[in-house]
Amino acid sequence: MTTNLPPVNSESRRLHPPFASWRLFLMIVVLATWTGCKNYEDRISVTGLVTLDGEPLSNGFIAFVGDEGDAVAAGPIQNGHYELSESASRDGIRAGQYAVRIESWKEPPGKELPNGTFAEGVSAIPARYQDAKASSFTADVSRKSRKFNFEMNSKEK
């Protein structure tokens, strides 16, 4: 069988070093990272305390919801305290007005039951706090306003 490939010699190796593609790849990664970093400069660290009947909520989840109804930033609540991030790689949140929803479960939803269905879960807080519109909680995030505390009442429906 005859091939039309040119013979490999030391001169052709110098023209096409084996790591040339790696250098190009590394340069693309560095440029992408450098240009993407600007997007994080306007993030504001948001923290606060969530209480139920005056006591810190032992655990839960808080979400700041944008105008379109989607959670823009979220984070866990532990011993009443929370700190928001947009994702695992983006700390903080952009300035703006947000509705707030809070979840806390005695029994989390989604557990598979013996009959093959899934449990609805048992909430540790009144259901209205789990809906951003019904909770009546809002946060106007800015550089000067970055700490938000939320007081829930278990007697409310």
Image: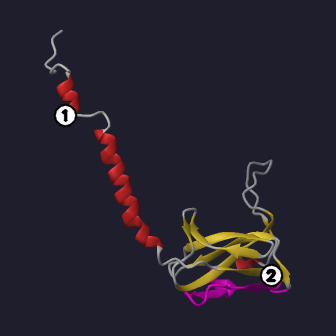
Mark 2 residue crowding within 10 angstroms, few (<14) / some (14–19) / many (20+): some
Q: Secondary structure at mark 2?
A: strand
Per the model, the C-alpha gap separating discs 1 and 2 is 67 Å
Query: Percent from the top left, x then y, of residue 49?
Result: 75, 81
Q: Nearer the viewer, residue 58 or 27?
A: 27
Query: What is the crowding at mark 1: few (fewer than 14 residues within 10 Å), some, or many (at least 20)?
Result: few
Circle 2 residue: 51
Disc 1 + disc 2, Cβ < 8 Å: no
Q: Specify whether residue 150 is painted magenta.
A: yes
Magenta highlight range: 131-157
87, 106: nearer the viewer:
87
Instruction: Identify residue type, mark 1.
Output: Leu
- Residue drawn at x 63%, y 73% as measured from the top left: 84
Q: Quadrant of residue 104?
A: bottom right
Image quadrant assignment for residue 88: bottom right
Residue 152 on the magenta segment? yes
Q: Secondary structure at mark 1?
A: helix
Disc 1 target residue: 15
Q: Going 55% across and 79% down the picture, which residue do you hit?
A: 44
Residue at the spot x=57%, y=74% of the render? 92
54 w.r.t. 117: above or below? below
- Among numbered discs 1 and 2, the one appearing first in the sequence: 1
